[in-house]
Amino acid sequence: MFAAQAIDISDKAAFYRDLAKQLKALLEGEHDSIANAANTAALIFQMVPDLNWAGFYFLASDEELVLGPFQGKPACVRIAVGQGVCGTAVELGTSMLIKDVHDFPGHIACDAASRSELVVLLEDEEGVFGVLDLDSPLPGRFDSADQAGIEALAAIYVAASSFQD
Ligand code: SME
């Protein structure tokens, strides 16, 4: 049985280094991309404070993201590339760190409680194929240290998993 170990978050870089080790241990020996996404979302939701949603969207085509494994309230299933924070991340090919979602035109509110959002890309040698999305009920919850830490976790998830075209 895998039991996540509590980590002190006062040093965010150290927190995410430790969480990365735990994620590697959790995914070790398993390549199923859905199972690994489910456990990655569960670990993040359990360990990262002040989240109300954590999960995956995968590109179903060049134009559309479809909901993957997540923790939190039920969410919108399909997001067009270029729409919302997730679709904008894919269109621009960059992570999105939104301090206040009320200030982001086109933000898609799956949970009215969400106030800040961090979206990082899932990418392999063939390019971007999805996003990992975190929401918080606290405005300004995420900073560049969270972005770097979550990008590292997304990379661990991609490296551990097999994806079929
Ligand atoms: N807020 C996202 C939609 C997904 S939910 O937050 C789970 C967006 O604007 O793309």
Image (cartoon, grey):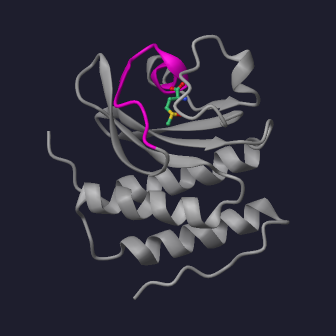
User: Is there any visible trace of residue 160 in the rendered image?
Assistant: no
Q: Which residue is drawn at 36% across and 59% down?
A: 38
Q: Give the quarter of the figure containing the N terminus.
A: bottom left
Q: Give whichever of 146, 113 is nearer the camera.
A: 113
Q: Give whichever of 80, 12 is nearer the camera.
A: 80
Left or right, 150 with respect to 40, comes to right
Q: Using the rendered view, name the quadrant where residue 160 is placed.
A: bottom left
Count of all numbered marks drawn on residues in the image: 0
Residue 147 is one of the magenta-drawn residues: no
User: Is there any visible trace of residue 147 in the rendered image?
Assistant: yes
Left or right, 45 with respect to 55, comes to right
Left or right, 145 with respect to 110, comes to right
Q: In this view, does 105 lie above or below 77?
A: above
Q: Residue at x 42, y 75 (%)?
A: 26
Left or right, 97 with respect to 61, comes to right
Q: Give whichever of 41, 30 is nearer the camera.
A: 41
Residue at the far right in the pictured view: 10
Residue 159, horizontal then vertical, whole percent: 36, 57
Q: Is residue 162 above or below residue 135?
A: below
Q: In this view, does 158 lie above or below 147?
A: below
Residue at the far bottom in the pictured view: 1
Q: Residue at x 65, y 51 (%)?
A: 51
Q: Give the range drawn in magenta.
A: 74-89
Residue 95, horizontal then vertical, whole percent: 58, 32
Q: Give the quarter of the figure containing the C terminus.
A: top left
Residue 121, horizontal then vertical, whole percent: 47, 37
Residue 149, horizontal then vertical, whole percent: 64, 54
Q: Which residue is drawn at 70% across and 35% down?
A: 116
